[in-house]
């Protein structure tokens, strides 16, 4: 972090997409309100994940492509913090970086957006549904085998424009992103988690920084939400133990009530023919241990074989 006699300057590394910049500006405004004399600047990056739009993420390196450039900026001292959508953050961080802050979580559910149809059940056979998420694709194909599920890449506005131009009958986006961008009116259905289990960390924003930068960590800690951190860490423990990464057909979601966490997870084949699911309830402070136990149950059911076939298909 850079300092001067008059003020402190904190530099945020962010993707240039509208949603990423909303998240970065949320962090900026909160920190400037909390710390007199703190000047927060945002440095925008166009990541490899933003540039490669004609190939599935799973074939070009997964969602880590959305954070790599930001992490390099941290490691090289060009920025002090990076603000991420937690569902895009790989399960293992580069050496020297930490994620000390999880901001309060927005609604983690998936959302149906359509000009004509009010919910998934109203979509007719053959309806064209767009989503780039293999997690969403496997669950939709399992529950609605007559739909025509198609890949859809790009930022939120790009995806909406393709829907509006008639390329799709409906698309699936994250509810959290639409709410943050003041697009709640576009949501036709907030899809129940029983129908479409979210990705690990969906709806949560994380702040990454250098592990040795105690001054920055002390500045950003007031943005931390303990309940969100407990749930997301448990979800990420499932994915990490499955060695699933970000862009795989894996869903996991933890709900906290009265010091208990109810954790659900699934692994599926992209064609929807195989869906393996498990759930556990335990003490919230043991969420990561619970996540490992849940992953072990899925592995006992054959999740390793499903994921091995998936990775083989991507090569």
Image (tube, rainbow, N blue to C red):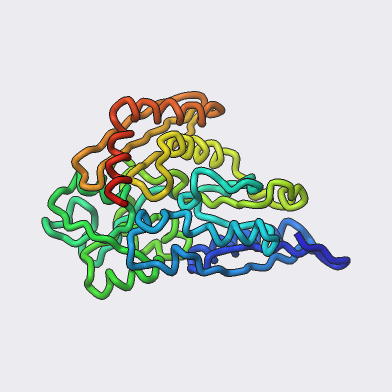
Q: How many marks?
A: 0
Asked if 21 appears above or below 202 in the picture, the reply is: below
Q: Nearer the viewer, residue 11 or 172?
A: 11
Where on the picture, by quarter, is residue 293? top left
The residue that appears at 78% across and 63% down in the rendered structure is 2
- 176 left or right of 12 in image: left
Image quadrant in which the N terminus is located: bottom right
Please indicate, yes or no, whether residue 185 appears anywhere in the rendered image.
yes
- Tell me where residue 137 appears, x and y as whole percent: 27, 51
Q: Residue at x 74, y 66 (%)?
A: 39
Q: Nearer the viewer, residue 70 or 260?
A: 70
122 sits to left or right of 81: left
Q: Nearer the viewer, residue 102 or 44?
A: 44
Question: In the drawing, does residue 11 fall left or right of residue 185?
Answer: right
Q: Quadrant of residue 81?
A: bottom right
Please state if 224 lies on the left or on the right of 15 as rendered: right
Residue 68: % across, % down: 53, 58
Residue 132: x and y in percent read 32, 58
* Residue pictured at 42% horizontal, 39% vertical: 243
Measuring from the top left, give residue 191's x and y in whole percent.
31, 49
Residue at image point 38% right, 50% down: 247
Residue farthest to the bottom?
A: 165
Using the rendered view, name the quadrant where residue 169 is placed.
Answer: bottom left
> Is residue 255 visible in the rendered structure shown here?
no
């Amino acid at each position: 972090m850079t300092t001067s006699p008059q003020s402190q300057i904190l530099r945020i590394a962010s993707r240039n997409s509208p949603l990423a910049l909303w998240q970065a500006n949320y962090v900026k405004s909160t920190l400037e309100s909390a710390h007199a004399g703190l000047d927060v600047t945002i440095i925008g990056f166009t990541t490899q994940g933003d540039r490669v739009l004609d190939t599935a993420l799973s074939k070009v390196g997964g969602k880590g492509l959305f954070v790599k450039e930001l992490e390099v900026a941290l490691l090289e001292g060009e920025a002090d913090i990076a603000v991420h959508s937690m569902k895009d953050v790989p399960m293992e961080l580069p050496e020297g970086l930490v994620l000390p802050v999880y901001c309060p979580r927005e609604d983690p559910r998936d959302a149906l957006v359509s000009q004509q149809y009010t919910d998934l059940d109203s979509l007719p056979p053959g309806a064209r549904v767009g989503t780039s998420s293999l997690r969403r694709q496997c669950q939709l194909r399992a529950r609605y085998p007559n739909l025509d599920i198609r890949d859809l890449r790009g930022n939120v506005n790009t995806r909406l424009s393709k829907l509006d131009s008639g390329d799709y009958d409906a698309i699936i986006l994250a509810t959290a992103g639409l709410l943050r961008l003041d697009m709640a009116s576009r949501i036709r259905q907030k899809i129940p988690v029983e129908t479409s289990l979210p990705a690990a960390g969906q709806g949560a924003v994380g702040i990454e920084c250098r592990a040795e930068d105690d001054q920055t960590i002390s500045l950003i800690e007031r943005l931390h939400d303990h309940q969100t951190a407990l749930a997301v860490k448990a979800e990420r423990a499932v994915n990490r133990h499955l060695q699933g990464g970000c862009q795989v057909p894996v869903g996991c979601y933890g709900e906290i009530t009265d010091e208990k966490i109810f954790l659900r997870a699934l692994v599926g084949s992209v064609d929807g023919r195989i869906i393996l699911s498990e759930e556990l309830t335990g003490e919230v402070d043991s969420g990561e241990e619970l996540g490992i136990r849940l992953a072990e149950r899925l592995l006992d059911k054959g999740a390793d074989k499903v994921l091995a076939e998936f990775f083989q298909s991507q090569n």
